[in-house]
Amino acid sequence: MSDINANTFYGQQAIKRNKPFGKPSWIQVSRKMPSHILGPPNFWMEFYKQAEALAIAFKESSDFNMLCTFVYQGENGKRKFVVAHPEMYWWHYEHRPAEERCSYEVIPENSPCRLYLDLEFSVELNPESDGPCMTNTTIDIFNAYLLKLWGLPSNVTNVLNLDSSTSEKFSRHIIFNTKNVAFKNNYHVGRLVKSICKDIFNYISSKEEQHDVLSSFDKTELQQLFVETKKEKKLFIDTSVYTKNRHFRIYKSTKWGKQSNLIVSKDCKYVHSTVYNDKELNIFLDSLISYFTSMKGIILFEYFQNGTIEAKSFKRVAQQYNYSNHDNCSSKYLVLDKYISDLIHPGKIRLCKYFSLAQVLMYETYGYRYCENIGRCHKSNNVSLIVNLTSKTVYQKCHDEDCFGFKSEPKQLPEEVCFDIDEEGDTFIRCATLTEDV
């Protein structure tokens, strides 16, 4: 059998796309993981684009060998997406110096995940707040809700409590890890968390003493969960971390340029799994939000907007990671579609064409005839708007014979549209110094 080189196997385009930044990445120059029959799949691919990484992770995963998408920050804080089995990722990651462990798990949209919480407050603004005590109260509250809503017996032994607090900020990541149980996706988790937070606020604000869950807690304990911020007083539970393809910091990781690695808290009562002889590996795998050793037999909890609940067996379905050419009146980028619709109002989008190789979207319009070439509306011919997804620009072309070959000057898309295109990927990199990761 003749050897097949990488160029032949992957194709020139794939090699170019997945070429590491600058020097060889730390993954390639690090240790080589020993192979064994029952070991994880020897799969590792790096991407510049989050969407491509998520698509490959889904395609290459099975119910018994799940691949995950990670984000790591290398030189100058640049981020890159990695698709690998978590055990494979940990093998390389754990030997990095503590200050260089800057990695995140991507929680895929519409994929099963665990219940997770991000708890934080400013120490300077809340010198009297007892973070560990507040955390334990919060864990007890959520366990009580799981029992009330789904009859799930949960306690501190199956709740992983990770700490990355500093002298300036109290910070905990809480992961509820109950065997064979997960949520349908992090949107359902977010709705549950926001609903519980609303319950706590309403219960504290009212004179009512009876509540199905909260009346078993002292009101003073519940009041202590509220903290001062620069704007207002609110719960120390961050409800903004349940968005599309969320980046969530992994065990032992720190934020770029900071020394605040996530470690097991001193007051954590979690009993880690014993699948592997390596305790740290067990904790790492247990801490992942969207990784499951096997999806067989998993029960998925659902929490809907109106407060109704469901519990169903997991069924693997195809995700909407389709990158082939298609014609439609809309794209997968809802914010971009709205921007184009607003731009051509009262005109409408007649057709949207996606050209995958060129990474271009073409919006054919009707009822919108303004042409930048002649500075007025055409009498009969509509125009089309072209969006370059790589450069994040939009320009106009025209169907009129007199404007054949005309292309308007490209205009930069608004930041919120760029964010939608990148699915919290590239724009997240540009804003890394301005916004807080979790």
Image (cartoon, rainbow, N blue to C red):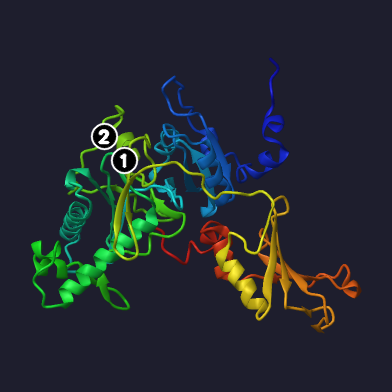
Three-letter amino acid code of the residue under disc 1: Asp
- Quadrant where the C terminus sits is bottom left
In-front residue for pair 174/337: 337
Q: Secondary structure at mark 1?
A: helix
The residue that disc 2 covers is: 273
| Residue at figure coordinates x 33%, y 40% from the top left | 298
Disc 2 to disc 1: CB gap under 8 Å? yes
Three-letter amino acid code of the residue under disc 2: Ser
Left or right of 401, for residue 243: left
Q: Position of residue 330 (x, y in %)?
A: 62, 63
The answer to which image quadrant residue 276 occupies is top left
| Residue at figure coordinates x 38%, y 42% from the top left | 314
Q: Secondary structure at mark 2?
A: loop
| Residue at figure coordinates x 49%, y 33% from the top left | 30
Residue 151 vertical placement versus 87 (above, below): below
Q: Position of residue 360 (x, y in %)?
A: 70, 58
Residue 262 vertical placement versus 426 (above, below): above
Q: Is residue 2 visible?
A: yes
Q: Is residue 168 visible?
A: no
The residue that disc 1 covers is: 286
> Please, which residue is most extreme toward the right here?
402
